[in-house]
Image (cartoon, coloured by chain):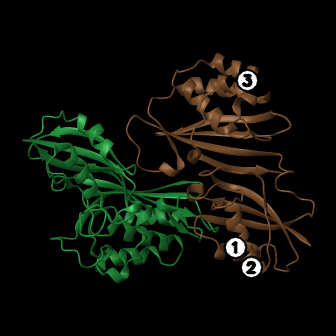
Chain colours: A green, B brown
Amino acid sequence: MRNIKLTIEYDGTLYSGWQKQNNAKTIQETIEKALSKILKAEVSITGSSRTDSGVHAKGMVANFFTDSRIPAEKFREAINTKLPDDIAIIKSEEVDLDFHARYLSKGKTYCYTIINRYEKVALYKNYSHHVREKLDLELMNKCCKMFIGKHDFSAFKTAGSSVKTSVRTISDLHIEKEDDFIKIYVTADGFLYNMVRIIVGTLIEVGQNKRSIETVKKAINSCNREDAGYCVPPNGLILEKVYY
Amino acid sequence: MRNIKLTIEYDGTLYSGWQKQNNAKTIQETIEKALSKILKAEVSITGSSRTDSGVHAKGMVANFFTDSRIPAEKFREAINTKLPDDIAIIKSEEVDLDFHARYLSKGKTYCYTIINRYEKVALYKNYSHHVREKLDLELMNKCCKMFIGKHDFSAFKTAGSSVKTSVRTISDLHIEKEDDFIKIYVTADGFLYNMVRIIVGTLIEVGQNKRSIETVKKAINSCNREDAGYCVPPNGLILEKVYY
């Protein structure tokens, strides 16, 4: 038995997210089907994250077990020939049998893209969220610092998710700007459901002067979802990298 | 009678190009239909360029005549409410009656995006052309200089187009790189049919060491299409700006 690790890029636009489910096309299922054709047997893969519908990835990691003798690095091209254009295996490699894409992840980096201009936007719509009011980046940058560190992020998760603890450590949260494009990068040891999207929504409200930086501190302390900002749409979000 | 100038952004992915034609959805027709709803009369608009199927624009310019008393700057929002998500009027303004979007254009800038990496690409496919072999940017930059100036670009046009002269002046041709993304910007007083895409294809062949810089000089001198490179796909191309 061997354990194969895959690094995967995908455009989530046409998928109902990563995780397999009935009556919906998902990334996981599409890759499993491609892999099953090659291995001529059913196979299930374990992903590091369950990205939502419309969310993209540059560096999703997944693993699967196989008795096949296909060299590990050959899986990349073999699977790619069976995949649609919007999913790409970037790397395939053999790892220890105890490697687990989800449980052993030490952290992840996500990037969220905003197009910030008054005019309507027609280009890059599947990869960005349009904000018309000019954002105050200086305020947003100040606010970024408040998120960094170990906190209970209960106010920044969508209810209904069952996790043991809502304490996470954000090691980096910073903003890059180029023309109308604002990219927010966030790295943490783990993320709660919709955590990135609610943090970004809160930062946007700060940048729009709709809320003060103090209200963000309050949200972090209160652990109350109502004290945090809105949840931005999924299509601006990219899973950049998973760390082990 | 008033003459209204529009600046337009669009995602060309789902359109059969700019120009109106039978049995195909085009940008021109979509805007004309939106405008006709507002003016409650048929109206035809004149575009500065006839972009091909799949080509995008950040700054297409068009104009139309109207007797309507709607303030010129109000057309922007009015038309946008009648347009689909992938076409956006960025600006509407009144111009002299003799303004003509096509005939009075003094020049245009196009940008072509290449993703240059060995691995399969899944993201940004509608906005880029994938080249696997590592491109030699130093050679490509050298080659750019050979295009700049006034030349007969007959070797760099697709046959069948009827124009009086194939002499054009390229004032700028340069390459910008960021990670795997290579962007080729070209500015000229006018472009022949497929000229940008054939110049880019030729530059790529130089960067792949499939042809020498000397063969490019030969193509410019011979005016023979067979001496130039391949025509890259349309989806990597964006009309950036039109000058008057």
Q: Residue furthest left?
A: A1
**Mark before the other along the chain sequence, 3 or 2:** 2
- Residue B186 vs residue A202, the one in the foreground: B186
- Secondary structure beneath dot 2 equals helix
Q: Marks 3 and 2: CB-CB under 8 Å?
A: no
Q: Amino acid at mark 1?
A: Ala
Residue B116 at what x, y percent from top left? 47, 36
- Residue A97 vs residue B238, the one in the foreground: B238
| Residue identified by numbered label 3 | B220
Are discs 2 and 1 located on one and the same chain?
yes
The CA distance from mark 3 to mark 1 is 43 Å
Q: Marks 3 and 1: CB-CB under 8 Å?
A: no
| Residue B168 in which image quadrant | top right
Q: Amino acid at mark 3?
A: Ile
Chain under numbered label 1? B
- Residue A227 vs residue B234, the one in the foreground: B234
Please give the name of the residue rendered at 45% of the width and 29% of the height, measured from the top-left corner.
Answer: B133
Q: Residue furthest bottom?
A: A226
Instruction: Tell me, for residue A150, which label it has, or none.
Output: none
**Mark before the other along the chain sequence, 3 or 1:** 1
| B100 to the left or right of B156 | right
